Image: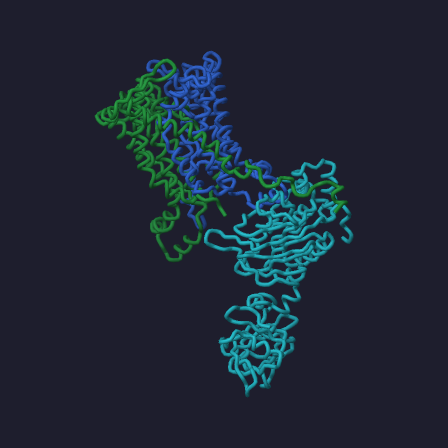
Amino acid sequence: MVGESPWAKVGRYLLIAIVVMIVLLPVYWMINMSFKTKSEFVARPPTIVVEKPTTENYYDLLVTQRFIRFGINSLIVALMAATISVSVGTMAAYALSRFRLPKNFNYHLLFTMLTVRMFPPIVTVIPIFVIYNQQILGFRLLDTQIGLGLIDAFMELPFVIWMMIGFFRDIPRDMEEAGLVDGDSRLGVLRKIAIPLAAPGLAATFILVFIASWNEFLLALILTQTKAQTLPIAVAGQITQYDIKYGNMMAAGVITTVPVLILALLAQRHLTRGLAVGGVTG
Amino acid sequence: MAVDRAIGDDGPRRARGTPWWERNLAWLLVAPTILLFILFAIIPALTTVSYAFSRVKMTRGGVQQQFIGLENFVRAFQDPLVAQSAWTTIRWMFIVTAIEVVLGLALALLLSGNFRGRGLFSSLLIIPIIMPPVAVSVAWLFMYDYEFGVFNYLLNQIGMPSVRWLSDPGIALYAMMAVDVWQATPFAFLLLYAALLSLPRDPYEAAAIDGAGRWHVFRTVTLPLLQPVLMVVVLLRLIDAARIFDKIFIMTRGGPGSSAYTATLTIYIEGFTKFDFGYASALSFLFQLSLIAAATFYVKRVLADYAAPAE
Amino acid sequence: MSSFLGSRVEGRSAPVSFERVSKRFGAVTAVHELTLEVPDGEMLVLLGPSGCGKTTSLRMLAGLEAISDGTIRIGDTVVNALPPRARDIAMVFQSYALYSHLTVYENLAYPLRVRKLPNVEIDSRVRDVAEIVQIGELLDRKPRALSGGQRQRVALGRAIIRRPAVFLMDEPLSNLDAKLRLHTRGELKRFQRELATTTIYVTHDQAEAMTLADRVAIMDGGVLQQIGPPKEVYARPASVFVAGFLGSPPMNLMEGRRASADGIPAIAIAGALIPATSGLAARLANLPSGSEAVILGVRPEEIVLLRSPEPGSVPGEIFVVEDLGNERLVTLDIGGQFVVARTPLEHPGEMGERKWFGFDAERAHLFDPASGRRID
């Protein structure tokens, strides 16, 4: 940056401006459109800023079509997925970062989890569908929130393990050893020292898993039908061959995006790390 | 000593030896992971393999399975739709990944170093990455609309005819690739940019003293230093691109016609619209096998660093 | 700070013993058959260069490292299989290892909370100990808001708050600046004497070892070299390693050969013959038969520089002269070997100048080059 010519500087900021525009345009357009009335929607030329903003699209979607219940389904599924995945994954990550299991098990488990990360979900979903469709202990998992939450949790497990191993490695080992010498058990040290110290990372991981589950489409499409249908599936269901209610769709897009955006802001500090271990991608 | 006892016992904690659960704590901690792995990976994998060699019929409360040998596989190799969707998937994977990584890298290099507003810029770039694919698809679906879409409006403004973005078989797939590029280029950029910022300064100073040109520095210094991160980014993008489903399903249902069927889409159609689980399982099996074959070598290199606990 | 320890923190100490304890990491042996007895209340310092196995030994005693072979006892209890919490120890780590997410108060309280003591007792003991280690006004702070010296005190306080049978200290002063280190060293010594609790203290710093220890155990390459009171170890180093490790500058170790001068036993060094007086001659006779080589050790302060040759003196050339402010170190080159003499500042000497030196051969140390052991 030292000795940069003024032209290079102008060029740089021009480039940034262009990139920002390209990134924001579809998002802006979606928000803009979601507040337009039917007549303004089809106006030519399109209005760059909505002229007569209305919430009728949102009202129609949330109240008339009762989208709120899909939102609640999504919320429950994502919360369950994040809770299960983060607790199970954190335990495994702690074991893998603090103990050396025999027969090079650390390596094998990590390698296996990476292959899980590589599974395209479609290849697991057929047998899962069949299993979920059966009565197991008098309970059918198909079209339930817990059923979808469980498989989402499993799909994100490699990500959680990877993330948490990183956070646990950042904790000085002798702090935990001090805990042991001070009289605590291994589990006590995990609970009272390692987890509190990894808490920010833990929270970020939770949020990222939540987002991934919230966004998830294929598994939700197959494993839920009506009762437990999630928001993305309901939104996609609005698109039919003959009649696309664009106003509603734009509103639906905004509604599905907003929670994710808020959460991402909270987890922002750890997001690059999250991306690097392969979390939340489209 | 007696005085001390009187004050309170805080000698050794009474545990004589270690309880079994603490001796095996490591195993107990990984046990839930292993359990989930068995339930959601091993059992499904075995089921898939057994279905792949069977004719599977849905019945009330279960399935009926009949062994038919290689029939499903023979059918798969003769099915033009399978070949076509495999080819579509491969094209999608490599085109999308190449564009995203090259664009991301170029952007990272052009913005290399700190600049004012870097934090805000990064925050904005996160938006596409974390946006629900369904929202992305919906937003773009409307921009691509033949009548009301903003793209055709702009084309018309400069005197060009409207384009059937999503209903022309020659264009639809590429139009949807553009959506993926929009969503995932920031991902490649953010990772590569972070890596660029953390590169050591010394090699650059040495190169500058040697009077090396920019292109030369990029090839001999930047690229090798960036290679590990580059490999991770490429791997992650390939993995995700290979499973592409949501955008295509939402925007065109794999259409127009079957022109944009990818591997996942084909399996979905066979499995969940025709409910031919046997055939769909055979396709899954082939899909998984080819991915494993392609990735094993690649992954082993990336993984090595994570294998052992740090000392 | 005198009588700062009331009955509350009275020590309840126990002896420690290592019996042929070994530690192997794969093919590497970090500690080899260490045997040590530490009587109740003693302060034992494990001294050695980095990688000598001292810290590993301490960690085995703490239960943080598994024992490959041998037996460790605290009191009468074999602790080999016991987790750290059942060993009745407290430890001060080199990094202090304070719990960074807890306040100073909670750091001190941790060992007591783990033992589920009533809050009232925890509170009063935390405040007592904070008083003792003089951090009373810092109780609400987090470790990152403390200076290095303050952190060290918190670590010490956390160790003494629960009256362990044994204190373990792993280079507890090495992260302090030089001045504070001297001051804290003195305090540590007082603490230990007043608590009268068995203490194992690991350091690579010989000044710390000499000042703090009741006995010093010097290790090298995973093997115990010598154990004894500091004075004795300094006066009678058991091996070439110990001789070369202790003292600053360390003992001069000159390679020589057994010889005779006019029928009298002597040692030949750099072309000069040093006649052996009766005591030295007797020791020379103890050299393993067949070996002629010998290592002669003389402390720099026992070297006398001479202007002209005298009987039994060795010639050399001044290689370098270093002034330390209160004294002068003169290094002589005697045919490829170097000998350092500690002299008063005003002692004359120029680089390149020809000099002789002498020493009291009776007080010189003898070592067998083959085994490195001392010969008496």
Instruction: Indicate the quadrant where residue C237 lies.
Output: bottom right
* Residue projecting furthest to the bottom: C262
Give the left or right position of residue A85, taking residue C245 as reference. Answer: left
* Residue shown at 43% from the left, 17% from the top: A135
Q: From the rendered image, report the letter of the chain displayed in blue.
A: A
Q: How is the image coloured?
A: by chain
Q: From the rendered image, report the letter of the chain displayed in cyan.
A: C
Q: Is residue C186 visible?
A: yes
* Residue shown at 63% from the left, 55% from the top: C201
Q: Nearer the viewer, residue C346 or C156?
A: C156
* Percent coordinates x, y for residue B125 in the rendering: 44, 34
* Percent coordinates x, y for residue C296 in the rendering: 56, 75
Q: How many marks?
A: 0
Q: From the rendered image, report the letter of the chain displayed in green.
A: B
Q: Is residue A261 visible?
A: no
* Percent coordinates x, y for residue C190 in the rendering: 72, 55
* Percent coordinates x, y for residue A282 in the rendering: 40, 29
Instruction: Indicate the quadrant where residue B241 lies.
Output: top left
Residue C199 vs A151, above or below: the answer is below
Q: Nearer the viewer, residue B298 or A58?
A: B298
Quarter of the figure that contains the C terminus of chain C: bottom right
Q: Nearer the viewer, residue C130 or B97?
A: C130
* Residue projecting furthest to the top: A64
Q: Nearer the viewer, residue A181 or B301?
A: A181
Residue C339 vs A200, above or below: the answer is below
